[in-house]
Amino acid sequence: MMGMAENCKKLNSDVYKIVAHMFGRKDQLFYRNTISRYRISEIDYIQHCKDGKEMEKIYHVLLSGEEGVYPHLIEAAEERLRQLKPKSKWLRKTCPDLEGWVTNISRHNKELETRKNDETRSDTAVRIPKKLEDVPVRNREKRISSINYSAWDKYDPDTEILKMELAEEKEKMGVIEKQKRPKPKKSVSFNKYPTEAEAVYASNREKEKGNEFFKAGDYDEALQCYTNSISSKPCVNNLNNRAVTYLKLKQYELALEDCDRVLTIERDNVKAYTRKGEALEKLERYQEALDCAEFAVQKDPNNGVAQELAERVRKRCENKLTNTRMKIIEIE
Amino acid sequence: MVDLLQKPQIICHTQKSLDYAIHDVKWIPCSAKFIAVGGKSNGAGIVEIYALTGEGVEKRGEFCKKEHFKCATFDASSLRNRHLATGDFAGRLQVWDLEDNLVPIYKTTEHKAVINAIDGVSGAMSGCGAPEIVTGSRDGKILEVLWYGIFVKKILPVAKFLATEGTTGRDCWAVAFGNTYNNEERVVAAGYDNGDIKIFDLNTMKVRWSKCVKNGWGFSLTEKNIPMNKLVATTLESKIHCFDVKTYHPKKGISMCNRKSTQFDNLDGKTLAAKPRDIYDDRRFRNSVPLEIVRILYTISIIQSDGWKKTDEIPYGVAGELTMLQNTVVSEQPVTSFDWCADKMGLSVCSSYDQSIRVLITTKLKYH
């Protein structure tokens, strides 16, 4: 029993230290061991905890499930947090911008409802099923019956093997050909959508598709989707995303255009500046790149990407600077 | 590895108890409303419209019809006329205008048994071909209907897939459209209760691929409007199969990876809803006492994007791997249906056997 009490005290100080470093994540492993060792007394600790902030951190770590899922601990932590700090943001479980979204989408909804029309016409004709070319049934060569000795005399195994190999090759080539044939691309003619809501909807769907292709590394498809999205409704996000896709595809001029377009819409967009900086760097226009990078860093000092970009470009710029010597004049 | 502090959380935003058995819930596209379809205890089918408001959900309207409704979809109708296509227990496929719901805009009674699954395509997007609805029912038939709207009251189905004459068709449990990235291509995938999954190519009207997983329940194709990419199927005994249907090797067929949910035994898997990139929600329930529902999110990581293992120099698809992102118990009765909201990432609605609907929010999905 004494051991347990001592362990309790030790737990308090240890856990406190660790909780304090939580977001630094330095003592993850330590915390895990501590928790597993002193698990029995953890609930007591939670229930006797007096510090709201510490409680928040414990709750956050428990939720993330780093050291395992303890639903009873989570409940106890939530209870305690509610008692200690009822206004804590961790208790605020709703999506922070849900209300904003609801008003936004209701606006679109109203628009669609007022513009409802009675006829639904389809722009495209019904698909006519393609007549599949009849796969020519391969003439099964007549099997040589076992009593047909004269045929067997003429039979040559080597040529047969060659024939089989050729047939296989042909099949392989056929398959490869078929797969090399480029898939017919979606031919979309984006007529202007009659309602703003529809345009936004289509634009968002295409943008999401583009995002997924981008994450999977399929930049060509992503480009196609973003282009579709932009032709439905250009907006800052679409253009930014397409710019970075162009960067990946090494088409720097086009990336530059897109970034400029973003900047005409929204003058202070940090992402656009960083992307523009990267594009300019690849185009070897270092001075301009430096300007963009510095602007980005100024706007968002925590942006690692912008800072690295600025470093690289600055070095390049300095290489180009002529050596200027400073004259030292002694003043008497 | 999933960054542990960025693990998605599934939170129940609001909950509402209803007085009828709910069979399906769907979001109304481009709005903060959803519908719940089901059947009352007096035998009438009911469709109710709910809206998400500041405090919770409030009912905006309802209408009752003769038969219980089993499934519904908005996917075949355009955004300006958001018509609801429903399948009911008598095998009728009807399309309703939610505001003017005395008489259905379109009705067909080709099916003779309950319509188990319905899917629509190309309503809101252009360039994907004509809008269509496909239904699968217990009599083993799959029906595909061209959706032209009010003008054509009597329109015959465009395509039917039946069991061969003389044999009884197996129950069809799930249907899904896919590969609709341009005006010509379209496939329908269908799952039967004996575990058959068939993909019908509507262009050539032939079976493109078929596979038997031991027992079937439900599936979906990722992202209808892109060239067919992945098909995920769930079965009884809690197995999830993921097929890469993009590349078809003539000898080996389609590559597959599967995963058994190891946490719960005797689990029945149910249909999935796909939402941003390969994130599936999977509703399950435990057979042992006490019954609980668990919601599991899976993500499919694509090992190589154009992943082709070159065996014999013909590309062979790589199915990727399924990793579980999160699971939560949301209610004490099994979850009957689930739908992600297309307009807001992470927002979803689900219904369960305890006759209640819950609006759920899943956080941190954008990291995955």
Image: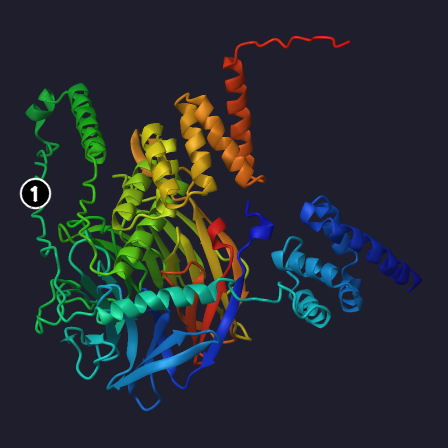
Q: Residue at x 87, y 59 (%)?
A: A9
The image position of residue B321, as x and y in percent, is 45, 46
Towards the viewer: A105 or B293: A105
Rendered view: A94 above or below B355: above
Residue under circle 1?
Answer: A133
Q: Is residue A310 left or right of residue A218?
A: right
What is the chain identity of the residue bearing mark 1? Answer: A
Q: In this rendering, does residue A291 appear at all?
A: yes
Question: Which quadrant of the figure contains the N terminus of chain B?
Answer: top right
Farthest right residue?
A2
Residue B173 lies in what quarter of the image? bottom left
Farthest bottom residue?
B42
The count of marks equals: 1
Classify mark 1: helix, strand or loop.
loop
Towards the viewer: B151 or A165: B151
Q: Amino acid at mark 1?
A: Glu
Q: In this rendering, does residue B340 appear at all?
A: no
Residue B88 lies in what quarter of the image? bottom left
Rendered view: B77 above or below A291: below
Residue B146 lies in what quarter of the image? bottom left
Rendered view: B22 above or below A33: below
The image position of residue A272, as x and y in percent, is 42, 39
How packed mark 1 is, by other alpha carbons closer than 10 Å (few <14, some 14-19, many 20 or more), is few
Q: Residue at x 28, y 78 (%)?
A: B69
Q: Is residue B314 left or right of residue A276?
A: left
The image position of residue B353, as x and y in percent, is 43, 78
Q: Residue at x 6, y 24 (%)?
A: A150
Q: How is the image coloured?
A: rainbow
